[in-house]
Image (cartoon, helix red, strand yellow):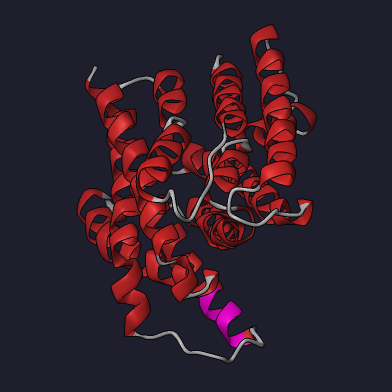
Amino acid sequence: MLGIVLALLSAMSFGISQIFVRKNLEKSNFIYISLTVTIMGNIILWPLALKFTDLNTVNPEGLMLFVLAGLLAPGIARLFYFKGMETAGISANASIFATYPLYTSIVAVSLLGEALTAENWIGLGCVIAGVIFVGRNVNRTGTQSNKIPKKGLIAPVLGSLAIAFSQIVRKEGLNIYNQPLLGVAVGYSTSIIVYILVIVASKQKSRRFSRKDIQLFWKPGVGIAAGWLLSFLALSQEMVSIVAPVLQTELLFILFFTYIFLRKLEKISIKLVASAILIIAGVILISIN
């Protein structure tokens, strides 16, 4: 029971953090938001990783896989997440991102030779249907005051792909070197390098990263890091097959908090809520072993 409660708290922490980001989204850009959130995560995660990891058992191969996983997510995936929040709105963006288990399953079947049960295939169908409904809903009504073109969904789709491949790489890294807290911290550090390189290469010189970005987005940075920690605690108390589906309720928390706090910024239709529920149901079925 404790594991389920921790997983729900994790999902809620992730959800409310995205609300904080959305409220100040127009005051910065997706690159600086990603950098700020990741800086806060490093400040929180590294002391814990060093305290609870036996550094005498460090495995270089496992660390390299953690670096690669971190490059994909949170690195690239976080950039696409906050870019998707700009182009598709918080609700549609979160709905598309929740589909990453679909891509993970496809890769597992095609490359790793894993077999899927009937429930898994039904879940895949539900996720695909949910994504289609999200796309149609966004095109007809939009999540904001203006209609959103289909290309607005490109960023969340690419981001969910990055998360899917990251999960596979991270799982392989944990099979070699089972230190999840250190793995997340390494991934966060890798992400900072990614964002700095993106900033240097970016042609957008209109404004610099400043103290204002920290002031606006340190709270969601803390919330997202707390979500990671709570999810690990949940996994330490309960089976993965139970925790993973509960964590997917993050999408419902986002929809709920959006309705409560962001009514003037975002529109949530019944069709979008139904699509989100269909996606969550599909993800739960995919998670069944």
Residue located 73% across and 42% down the image: 140
**Quadrant showing the C terminus:** top right
Q: Is residue 254 above or below residue 106?
A: below
Q: Is residue 190 magenta?
A: no
Residue located 67% across and 37% down the image: 134
Q: x%, y% of residue 255? A: 45, 38
Q: Quadrant of residue 180?
A: top left
Query: Is residue 179 visible to us here?
Result: no
Q: Is residue 239 above or below residue 79?
A: above
Q: Quadrant of residue 45?
A: bottom left
Q: Is residue 134 left or right of residue 289?
A: right
**Quadrant showing the N terminus:** top left
Q: x%, y% of residue 229? A: 29, 44
Residue located 50% across and 41% down the image: 176
The span picked out in magenta is: 195-200
Q: Is residue 74 above or below residue 160?
A: below
Extreme-top residue of the structure: 118
Q: x%, y% of residue 285? A: 58, 16
Q: Is residue 108 left or right of residue 168?
A: right
Q: Is residue 158 above or below residue 257?
A: below
Q: x%, y% of residue 84? A: 61, 56
Tell me the chief SS of the magenta region. Answer: helix
Q: Is residue 159 left or right of residue 27?
A: right
Q: How many marks?
A: 0
Q: Is residue 197 magenta?
A: yes
Q: Which is nearer the eye, 115 or 234?
A: 234
Residue located 47% across and 31% down the image: 248
Query: Is residue 89 visible to us here?
Result: yes
Q: Which is nearer the eye, 192 or 129?
A: 129
